[in-house]
Amino acid sequence: GFVDPDTLPRLLLEPTEEEKRIAEARANLPPPSAALNLDDIEALAQGVLSATAWAYYSSAGDDEISHGCTLNKVSHASPATTVLSFPSSLPIFVAPAALARLGHPGGEVNITKAAAKEGIIQGLSNNASCSIEEIIEAREKDQPLFFQLYMNRSREASEALLRKVEGAGFSAIFLTVDAAVPGKRERDQRVKGDFAGPAVNGQDRVGNGVAQAISGYQDPDVCWDDIPWIQNITRLPLIVKGIQCVEDAEKAYESGVQGIVLSNHGGRQLDFSPAPITVLKELRERRPDLLDDKNFHVFVDGGVRRGTDVLKALCLGARGVGLGRPFLYANSLWGEEGVRRAIQIMREEIITGMQLLGVTSLDQLKPEMVKYVDRDPARIPPTPRFDPPRTGTQPKGS
């Protein structure tokens, strides 16, 4: 018979301690303008993220000094450039990073909208939490988007995805080659959580950490023979992401791809893999012709937190620099507005750095402006700008 829903007992769910902590942290969040640098954003993000999300975003497995010229007119310095021939207001792009919805329900859509408003290009992860359809619906007309591809064990699945991406209007393919198997991300594994990815080979991957949950479909045998296979399927520019040595950069150049990304996957794969800026320095020393070839694009992704980091890479010959975690943290805090604030911080720092180097356009940057110190100093954490939100009562006298 008929059941009146108003007569049913109401189920009251008591929030967990973590949910209470996150709610209190969000209630105490300052406005985006209070964040003066990307370290501020990261420090705040830890408070509003679940333990699972923070462990996944932050888990992981050079020292340079710049000098410039003075007494130049620098009141009108422009950081505008092109990335793979697409106009960009800054020499940075959103590096593809998985699962932006772990930090904010808007997920990658927030990043798409922010990138459009700030005039930079977004790379969408193969493991994005928003669908391709959601991203296409959110983007502005003629907004360029890059797609990051993991080669699937099923070549039929990879082919179908490539055709879908090209048909959707993406502008380039970034083939990731440094994650054929998942790295050992212990912080992520310890938290475990109840995040569930797709079952692989009939095995449930719940409880092994987020990275393990979304892995398993990638082909561990991806190799150089896959490059012409992809080129036969799509006409989109192909960029090989995850190059960690000069020898592989040379092979990529000879394979006819349009470019490479020097990257160690954010330090999340092979432990003690070289920093991308170190590989870039070696490439400048051993194969400067690759960097000077206008038809071959070398990008850097990883370890960038300051506008001066971007300028160092450009001085050494990189065409652009990708940032991943900073945009995940910013999205977790303030959604689209937070991502825009992170981009604005980089814009301010890049322009100020250009002016202090005595240049007004990026093509004036040159290797002589960077001095390399051949050591790996311990990184001293910056002085915290924000105290983490306090929970509970404080001891008397504190």
Image: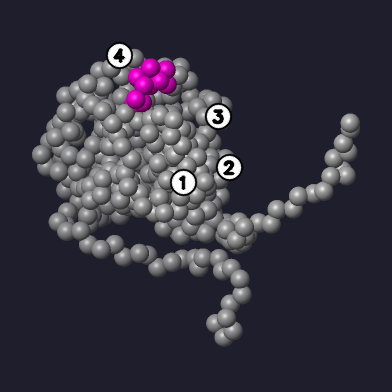
Q: CA distance from mark 1 to mark 2?
A: 22 Å
- The secondary element bearing badge 3 is classed as helix
Label 3 sits on what residue type?
Glu
Left or right of 67: which side holds 389?
Answer: right
Which residues lie in the magenta part? 151-161
What residue do we see at 52% from left, 46% from top? 194
Of labels 4 and 2, earlier in sequence is 2
Residue that badge 4 annotates: 232
Q: CA distance from mark 4 to mark 2?
A: 37 Å
Residue 10 in magenta stretch: no
Residue that badge 1 annotates: 207
Left or right of 397: which side holds 311?
Answer: left
Q: CA distance from mark 3 to mark 2?
A: 13 Å
Label 2 sits on what residue type?
Pro
Left or right of 109: which side holds 247?
Answer: left
Of labels 4 and 1, earlier in sequence is 1
Residue that badge 2 annotates: 105
Q: Which mark is residue 134?
A: 3
Label 4 sits on what residue type?
Asn
